[in-house]
Image (cartoon, helix red, strand yellow):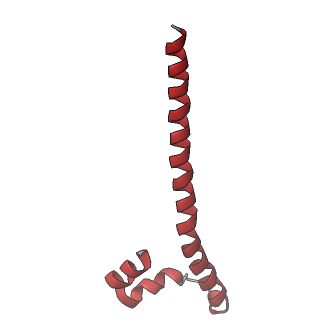
Amino acid sequence: MAIFMGLLENGVHFYKLFVPNVPLYMLPFLILIEIISYIIRVFSLAIRLAANITSGHVLLFTISGFAVKLFKLN
């Protein structure tokens, strides 16, 4: 989705994101690395978001379990 929005907003100039300022002989290799890192970033952020949501739910479940046990003792 971000790629399409970037293309709509900037047109062909969006692809300059993948072209670093390096010598010409290194350019094909670095363009490939930039594209792969741009794609992998989406999956990395999705995994981090899922882990944070899961840890939040586990924390709430643990604290509520302790609270229930504490109230049962009194």
The image shows residue 70 at horizontal and vertical percentages of 53, 15
Classify residue 48 as left or right of residue 6.
right
52 and 62: which is toward the camera: 62
Task: Tell me where residue 25 sits by quadrant.
Answer: bottom right
Dividing the image into 4 quarters, which one contains the N terminus?
A: bottom left
Classify residue 60 as left or right of residue 10.
right
Q: Is residue 28 above or below residue 39?
A: below
Task: Tell me where residue 28 sits by quadrant.
Answer: bottom right
Which residue is located at x 46 percent, y 86 percent? 15
Residue lying at the far front in this picture: please name it: 72
Which residue is located at x 56 percent, y 43 percent? 55
The image shows residue 67 at horizontal and vertical percentages of 50, 21
Q: Is residue 11 above or below residue 45?
A: below
Which residue is located at x 55 percent, y 18 percent? 69
Which residue is located at x 49 percent, y 14 percent? 71
5 and 57: which is toward the camera: 57
Q: Is residue 14 above or below residue 38?
A: below
